[in-house]
Amino acid sequence: MPKNIIVSNRLPVQAQKTDETWSFTPTSGGLATGMKSVHQEGDSLWVGWPGVSSDGLDEKNKNQISKNLEKNQYRPVFLNDAELDNFYFGFSNKCLWPLFHYFIEYHQFDTQQWEYYIEVNQKFADEVLQVIEDGDIVWIHDYQLMLCPQMIKDVKPEVTIGFFLHIPFPSFEIFRIFPERECLLNGLLGADVIGFHTYDYERHFLSSVKRILNFDVNFNIILHHGREIVVNTFPMGIDFKKFEFAALENARNNSLESSELKKQINAHKLENDGKLILSIDRLDYTKGVVNRLLAFERFLDIYPDYHDKIRLVMLAVPSRSKVAQYKQLKRQTDEVVGRINGKFATVNWTPVWYYYRSMEFENLIDLYVSSDVAMITPLRDGMNLVAKEYLATRVDDDGVLILSELAGSSKELPQALLVNPFDIEQLAQSIKTAIEMPIKEQKERNSISRKRIRRYDINKWSSNFMQALNESANKESASQVKWVNTLVAKKLSDSYKKSNKRLLLLDYDGTLVGFHENPNKAIPSETLLELLENLSQQKDTDLVIISGRPHEFLEQHFAHLNLILVAEHGLFIKYPNAPWEEKKGASSEWKEHLLPVLDTFTDNTPGTFIEHKKNSLVWHYRKADPELGIAKSVELKTVLASLLPNDLALLDGNKVLELVPANINKGVVALDLFNSKRYDFILVAGDDVTDENMFLNLPSEVHKIKIGKKKTAAEYYIRNYANFLSFLKKLVP
């Protein structure tokens, strides 16, 4: 039975040893809550680090941990101190975390830590590969494991893989700073579905894929190595019912005053109808804690009437306290809190209640339900679930949420008071607006927001992502164009070997070699030349390279082989041991009329260039800015459509527009070769729109293979040129 495999940096449990026995305490958090339903439904396995360094563990302890975790369908990845220091505390949190949150000044790329990042990602991938089976679905989480999808896909190409990033994905201009940017993107593209909290992050990611990798992107679909990768937005929710129920229970038990915190809160509320502003965050430089304090100080400066009537309750949960930037932030926070309290405090009033610790769930609910205002103003945040938790506890729809417009949750909660977290004056004014907001307006705003987060809760988030993964798997199996899997490859290979007369028609770029930004560098390797020679030497086999390349290129690299060469889509043809033949009736007088048009577009589109062939002109826009190149290509096609004579055709290829005589195309020459002899096995393969003429012109008994999964008239597809070469090798005895 297929299973779901969840992969995250941490397992949702913490391993602890008492005497000789290992125990495991469940951990709280959005991911643990969100994946609970996925993990508990059906056959599931969760792979991750159990929270204890392997340096102090012998094989006996590791076996005990593994066996105990196995009972709850967990599988540990053991990490030692060096791996934790370099992979997690080092690279993940000193390099990726600040860069993705736009804190370039804190971004530190260390080559050794990058090597550890690769090794640990491989360690996670290897652990998955030990248990994975065909039909399984893998869901990988967050920035610590961005290389893992491709590592798994390389070994198990048919397994469906999802990846979700729980932090922001930065703009292209920020992401391009990262030295190993191509590697990181390619790692993510091993996934079939890639999810982000907001459309902004999705858009930034797609922009980086287009501009750095130069891959085709069609809306939210990335075409990569013959695969269609879906990129979409899945805003993470919370366990709404849990927080709402806790708030209702808190109200029922209010008279019991069960905690010291609750007593303090109630005492403040009784004093002059005192207002509470709540601030809850991990103490992280991305959370805007200091800016929030400065704004509160500014508010007290300009509105002295609110002295003694308002308090800021600031809960700062310790985080990465060993890292230098976090130590500095802690000192700065302590200093600002001390300054504010020293400046404004009276005998009976302390303006800031500051808690530097984690807090029990019950106390957290005390704070949520008692606070008149929640001030959640991170400088950058992937989602921020605290904002949603606060609203979930407002069972009477009262209260005001001040929310940073740079938090992912702001996209879902536009009814909150949205603020720029860097604008201290605006933050200070938002406090006044919040505490003076009429109850009617509070309820109108919160009613809409609460309906949203109630409907799109944590279970909806996880089920939507799993649905996208299942749709990806089903779409692959339901495709009318058949994938050349092991069984199909064997069938074609057996048919080839049993045949008496064979014809192989093979495109060059994208079919026998990968695309290169400079076409002159996409030359055949020694391995490819050896493969072609072996195929061409087989008895009763005609091997044809049919390309849009100039005949000089094919002459230089393939004339020594026993091949039929077709250049410039059929303008030139060369049989073994014979000179090149040029198709008659082709004229190039049209060039002088249309070349100025191409020159104008080349001048206006940086990165484009014109390739001159014997009887065609090619406008290349692969090196142009992707969006500009596409826009200009559409404009150029529109202009040329009104200028083309009847005997001229415009071919729209892979980042190229080619003007060729209408009587010359690959389909015509392929049909001529097909009719030249009585073949009982014919295979044609190509990747481009120019190859579709061959698929359309040749009869149905021909085996037609498209390189890459695109719209095609071919019967089969192979994911990429490397897979196609592997298939060709199976035809050689």
Image: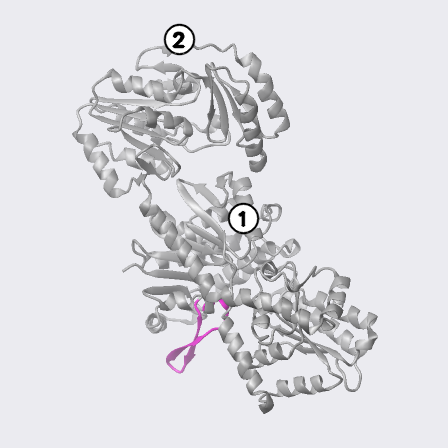
Q: Is residue 29 magenta?
A: yes
Residue at x-position 32% and y-position 33%: 714
- Residue 132 screen position, x and y as percent: 32, 57
Q: Residue at x 42, y 44 (%)?
A: 228
Q: Is residue 12 above or below residue 17?
A: above
Specify the quadrant that holds the N terminus.
Answer: bottom left
Crowding at dot 1, Cα within 10 Å, few <14 / some 14-19 / many 20+, comes out as many
CA distance for labels 1 and 2: 49 Å
Query: Residue 217's mark?
Result: none
Say which of marks 1 and 2 sits in front. 2
Residue 659 belongs to magenta span: no
Question: What label sits on residue 584 in the rendered view?
Answer: 2
Residue in front for this viewpoint, 28 or 696: 696
From the viewer's perspective, tell me whether residue 67 is left or right of residue 207: left
First-in-chain label (1 vs 2): 1
Residue 476 pos. (x, y %): 34, 46
> Disc 1, disc 2: CB below 8 Å?
no
Closer to us: 651 or 92: 651
Q: Which residue is mark 1?
A: 205
In what quadrant of the picture does the C terminus appear?
A: top left
- Secondary structure under tag 2 reads loop
Outermost residue on the top side: it is 585
Under mark 1, the amino acid is Phe
128 vs 627: above or below = below
The residue drawn where x is 55% and y is 44% is 208
In the image, residue 499 above or below residue 388: above
Q: Magenta stretch?
A: 11-32
Residue 239 position, x and y percent, is: 49, 70
Secondary structure of the residue carrying numbered label 1: helix
Residue 343 visible (yes or no): no
